[in-house]
Amino acid sequence: MDFVERLQVLSRKIGQISGNLITEEATKTALVLPFLNSVLGYDVFDPTEVVPEFTADTGIKKGEKVDYALMKDGEVQILIECKKYGDNLNTKHSGQLFRYFSVTKARVAILTNGSVYQFYTDLDAPNKMDEKPFLTLDLEDIDEHIVPEVKKLTKSSFDVESIVGAAGELKYLNQIKKLLAEQFLAPEEEFVKFFASRVYDGVLTPKVKAQFMEITPKAIKQFLNDSINARLKSAIGGEVKAPLTEDKADTSVTSETQTDSEKSKVVTTAEELEGYNIIKAILRQRVAVSRIVARDTQSYFGILLDDNNRKPIARLHFNAKQKYIGLFDADKNETRHPIESVDDIFGFSEQLQAAINFYL
């Protein structure tokens, strides 16, 4: 398997066993060690390569340990601190890494909960670990843009100077992306003023500013939706076809299959795909995007977890003038909610995430 395939295998494994990862040790055994071994290429059974419970005299606290140290030629290259799967990673968790960083020759440190891997180096001050990671890998939502950078950390490709050299750009690139995401969701006044001042010729009075505070988020959403549609049309040559088909039913999930003639009548619209992408964006923090699958029918556009018709998430009823989104309760009963446009789906984020919880 190539590097990307090894990442994907581990990503799928998380979805299969996440419910059993209730301790830090279980997380290490089931996720972290396979990541070190199959993804990064280190022999976890060779103490000259991987040292568990690594101890060094920090001069501040005695007897402290970090979970793993990756070695090369007898020198520490990477320090790793592990937390339980599902734990939020923050600065308080990186305290031991911070102290050990200054007393070893390591230039890279990793903080992980088995799913999310935060990579640190010493960009801000030599031999002092930065407070913010220069790279974050989420195995349940793999960003293809950072895969080449993670690959540089593998045993066969490890080059500390190359890694640190690229870290500066990655750190600020990721921070800008995060900032943009925050502004898209809840734009600040200065962000709104930037656009308003370029399209509005008059004085930006409080009333005008308030108006642009409403207009700007709408414009951003429409721009993103237009971009998604343009990419979809480009990818399929301007014609939108049904990606999959779903069992036909009205308000309950059945196991009946459609005939070939029924499948041939299914037409998936750009609006349905747009709604599908919005639902994936809402749920990507709860489950891997690859687990959210679409099936289309003549009656509705269905969205399932794990491509399983016993795990319905939502249905989009876009075939009539009045649009509806169908949401499910714990008993898989569907309730339809009228919406004016696909953007209204964002207003059902809590209900969609609740639907996922029924199956986790």
Image: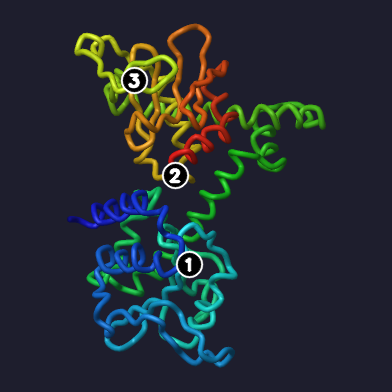
Residue pointed to by mark 3? 296
Above or below residue 267? Residue 343 is below
- Which of the two residues, 33 or 256, is positioned nearer the viewer here? 256
Amino acid marked by disc 2 = Leu
Q: Position of residue 33 (x, y in %)?
A: 32, 69
Whether residue 94 can be seen here: yes
Residue pointed to by mark 1? 83
Mark 3–mark 2 CB contact (< 8 Å): no
Q: Position of residue 120 (x, y in %)?
A: 47, 69
Sequence-wise, which precedes: disc 1 or disc 2? 1
Q: How many marks?
A: 3
Side of 126 relative to 291 (left or right): right
Indicate which label's residue lies in the foreground, 1 or 2: 2
Which residue appears at 57% of the width and 89% of the height? 61
Side of 194 relative to 322 (left or right): right
Residue 152 — which label? Answer: none
Q: Secondary structure at mark 1?
A: loop
- Which of the two residues, 144 or 53, is positioned nearer the viewer here? 53
Side of 279 relative to 46 (left or right): right
- Quadrant showing the C terminus: top left
Whether residue 118 can be seen here: no
Sequence-wise, which precedes: disc 3 or disc 2? 3
Residue pointed to by mark 2? 360
- Quadrant showing the N terminus: bottom left
Amino acid marked by disc 1 = Lys
